[in-house]
């Protein structure tokens, strides 16, 4: 099927780590992406991972990929108020030359 | 850093009118896209464009929609006769060559059909 699934909401305390999860259905997915959308703004590419990798780290961001379970996660260390946004997981499938398919997005809110 | 720019940021139109949403992709990119996001819902793929033709389109992209690259810099989405359900945020994106080249999105045009 087409679905990329994410939980809708996540609330974390400032300074804690946030872990946003995503599952996808197509085993032919080649690249998996995380985009961030702040209120009223566009989609900002945060990071992406190729399907033959298990992990990618970029400063406070860590992406983990479990290809067997088709599970992708984004960990944000030391979460700050500026991290409040909607986070979208997206996949690019080998079967499609061009498009990427988005999940429904996870709204991350930070509490003091 | 180069950006994808979209104009206008907000467009209000009456049902049945034609609208053209404009995008300037990143200058050395060759693949162009339109996505839309109805308020509170998923970001949905509409169409991709490469080498002056549509390479892929979704079921949403029916005969009311068309895309054009009228010159070397602009990429437009036209909705011929807008419906209330066309109200959404429309995002343009572009990417370079290479299979691992990610999509870069503009800030979107909010279309409101009344």
Image (cartoon, rainbow, N blue to C red):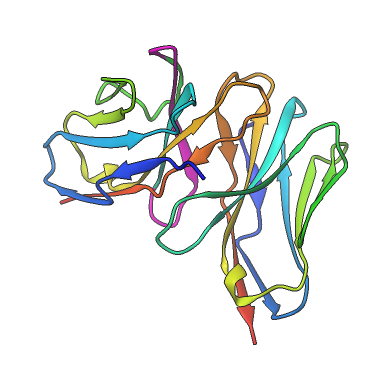
- The answer to whether residue A94 is left or right of residue B59 is right
Which of B16 and A111 lies nearest the eye of the viewer?
A111
Which of A68 and A86 lies nearest the eye of the viewer?
A86
Is residue B47 inside the magenta stretch? yes
Residues drawn in magenta:
B38-53
Is residue B66 inside the magenta stretch? no
Q: Height in image: A2 above or below A22?
A: above
Q: Where is residue B50 in the image (x, y as percent from the top left)?
A: 46, 16
Q: Where is residue A33 in the image (x, y as percent from the top left)?
A: 66, 42
- Identify the residue shown where x is 19% and y is 37%: B82
In this figure, what is the number of numbered marks? 0
Q: Which residue is at the far front?
A: B1
Residue B48 placement: quadrant:
top left
Residue B3 placement: quadrant:
top left
Q: Height in image: B42 above or below A15?
A: above
Residue B47 visible from this viewpoint: yes
């Amino acid at each position: 099927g087409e679905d990329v699934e994410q939980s809708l909401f996540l609330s974390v305390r400032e300074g804690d780590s946030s872990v946003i999860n995503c599952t996808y259905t197509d085993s032919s997915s080649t690249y998996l992406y995380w985009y961030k959308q702040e209120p009223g703004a566009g989609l900002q590419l945060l990071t992406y991972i190729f399907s033959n990798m298990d992990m990618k780290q970029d400063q406070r961001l860590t992406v983990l990929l479990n290809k067997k379970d088709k599970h992708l996660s984004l960990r944000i260390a030391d979460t700050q108020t500026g991290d409040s946004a909607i986070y979208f997981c997206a996949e690019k499938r080998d079967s499609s030359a061009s498009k990427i398919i988005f999940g429904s997005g996870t709204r991350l809110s930070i509490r003091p | 850093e180069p950006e994808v720019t979209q104009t206008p940021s907000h467009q209000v139109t009456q049902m049945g009118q034609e609208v053209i949403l404009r995008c300037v992709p990143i200058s050395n990119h060759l693949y162009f896209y339109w996505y839309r996001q109805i308020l509170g819902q998923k970001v949905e793929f509409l169409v991709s464009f490469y080498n002056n033709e549509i390479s892929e389109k979704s079921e949403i992209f029916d005969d009311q929609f068309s895309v054009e690259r009228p010159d070397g810099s602009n990429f437009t989405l036209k909705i011929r006769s807008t419906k209330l359900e066309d109200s959404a945020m429309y995002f343009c994106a572009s990417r370079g060559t290479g299979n691992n080249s990610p999509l870069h999105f503009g800030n979107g045009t909010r279309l409101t059909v009344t």
